Image (cartoon, rainbow, N blue to C red):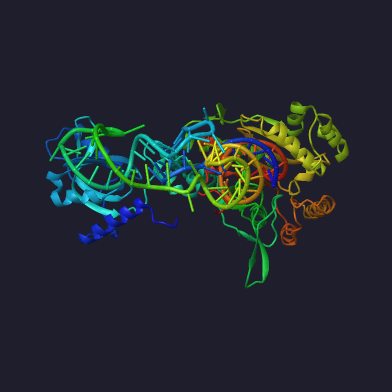
Amino acid sequence: MARIDNIVKQRQEKLQRIRQRGIDPYPHRYHRTHSAKEAIALFQRWEAARENAPFTEVSLAGRIVASRPMGKATFMDIRDGSGKIQVYFKSDSLGEEGYELLRELDIGDIIGVRGRVFRTRSGEVTLSASHLSILSKSLQPLPEKWHGLADVEKRYRQRYLDLISNEEVGRIFALRSRVMAAIRRFLDERGFVEVETPVLHHTAGGALARPFTTYHQALDQELYLRIATELHLKRLIVGGLDKVYEIGRIFRNEGISTKHNPEFTMLESYEAYADYQDVMNMVEEMVSFIAEEVLHTTKVSFGGDTLDLSPPWPRMTLRDAITDKCGIDFEQHLDEDSLRRQMEAIGMDVVEVKGRGKLIDKLISTFVEPNTIQPTFVMDYPIEISPLAKRKPGSESLVERFEAFAGGMEIANAFTELNDPLEQRERFKDQERLRALIGDEETERMDEDFLLALEHGMPPTGGLGVGIDRLVMLLTDQHSIREVILFPQLRTR
RNA sequence: GGGCCGCUAGCUCAAUGGAAGAGCAACUGACUCUUAAUCAGUAGGUUGCAGGUUCGAGUCCUGCGCGGCUCACCA
């Protein structure tokens, strides 16, 4: 802005006048005795007790969100983290000088007030202020009070304005916090150990995604931001931490959409001596536990549907799931060309899709994912797109892997982990060959350090990955991932 | 990256190709129980940016920027 906005100028002048009165507009601290919500509750208890003793004075602090001056009396609404309360100022009880100070206040300022709580004629619990303190002068105007802030771009870029203007936004993030706590409680109670593994990786493994690259000066090495926590957590399974989990930020250098942010939060857990059936049981129990903890129900509304998250969830094979929806049985087409012809025959555009695995992926994302509304486990995935999963006994082409879908989204991915070091090496080689063949950047990279760990012996293990952001979307009926990430990635202006 | 849509006062939104407006916020004044307070008045604009068409562009055209939805890729 080339020119200082008039509103800002006026507020700066008010700030100067406050200072001229000898008042510090940005004091170091303020002692408040109650939150707005606590003060209201305290007053209601006092009312119910019908005691003769006068109500004691309380000190509250918050941001002015509305002001209704009426000559020598003024009502303001102030808001703190607990909620809103009305404050009543009048010249009589505040003193003329104190009341004059109100003229220098604006909506958006943060103030402290002390006084007794009472009930107005219209019945609203209100604090009658006998003292006023300015705690922070705001120099910028807030969005309009009635419609709030609607500009989506501004809501994301200046999330604090969104939080101030749109109360429901704060509730989403409070719920997200309780989801995180519930996950930890669930896993901790089952004896899982929470760990933290490196974000900077020498090899970006554990998933099929393009990584972000960075550079370490002192090591003079290129490094990658992790695309998964999998390979480090498995090293810990080798080390004897039989039940581990990590909730961490993952970075994938892929497209941005309503379901994708370049950095997102994933839960990964690994349990020794378990297989994917055990993990399935755990996932349905965990998700319903979380829903009970944060919503007190396992029936959640999502996009007009009611999702029943209570266990057990339906289980079906991927083969059946796809065959049901489009009639193509990928197990009958073990070579790429044959499968491709089938997909083309039903009118799919697969010119850009390379490799049998990617073709099956396409079938999943076209037919299974968007059409699976109720929580469902889809099991037994093709080996080509599951290089870290253990083969299904008796099958050359399938692995013990499942994904959980709900609300048309993939929310979990899990498998019986491949612990045969020789086969794992071969699988890495297959991926390298695949990359050479189809030029796919999204293939698993050979990781000698991880193979060395496997060669020391990893017990049979069930592993799990859950997209936390999507789980929060599901529980809050939000349909854009940006609504559950405080500061979603946007292009700089 | 492609397609469609959007960008006007601090905020929420109007404005057939023909004088850029309203409400809230702000400012001045009145008002000691208001609560989307009320009443009277005032100020506030490079219509995202750059070109073009036209007697005349917020409006039509082109390019660019940012965003939303969507397709592709991914969790």
- Give the residue displayed 20% in from the left and 34% down from the top: A119
- Give the residue displayed 36% in from the left and 48% down from the top: A141
From the viewer's side, name the closer residue of A487 and B41. Answer: B41
- Give the residue displayed 61% in from the left and 54% down from the top: A241
Left or right: where B71 falls relative to B47? right
Question: Where is residue A308 shown, x and y percent of the image?
Answer: 56, 28
Left or right: where A217 falls relative to A91? right
From the viewer's side, name the closer residue of A266 and A22. Answer: A22
Question: Where is residue A406 shown, x and y percent of the image?
Answer: 61, 33
From the viewer's side, name the closer residue of A345 and A148. Answer: A148
Left or right: where A88 falls relative to A471? left
Q: Quadrant of residue A429?
A: bottom right
Question: Where is residue A480 shown, x and y percent of the image?
Answer: 56, 39
When the figure is inspected, residue A97 is found, relative to residue A49, above or below; the finding is below
The answer to whether residue A205 of the structure is visible from this angle is yes
Q: Name the residue at the bottom extreme.
A: A218
When the figure is inspected, residue A477 is found, relative to residue A485, above or below; the finding is above
Question: Where is residue A237 shown, x and y percent of the image?
Answer: 65, 54
Q: Quadrant of residue A236?
A: bottom right
From the viewer's side, name the closer residue of A68 and A369. Answer: A68
The answer to whether residue A391 of the structure is visible from this angle is no
Q: How many marks?
A: 0
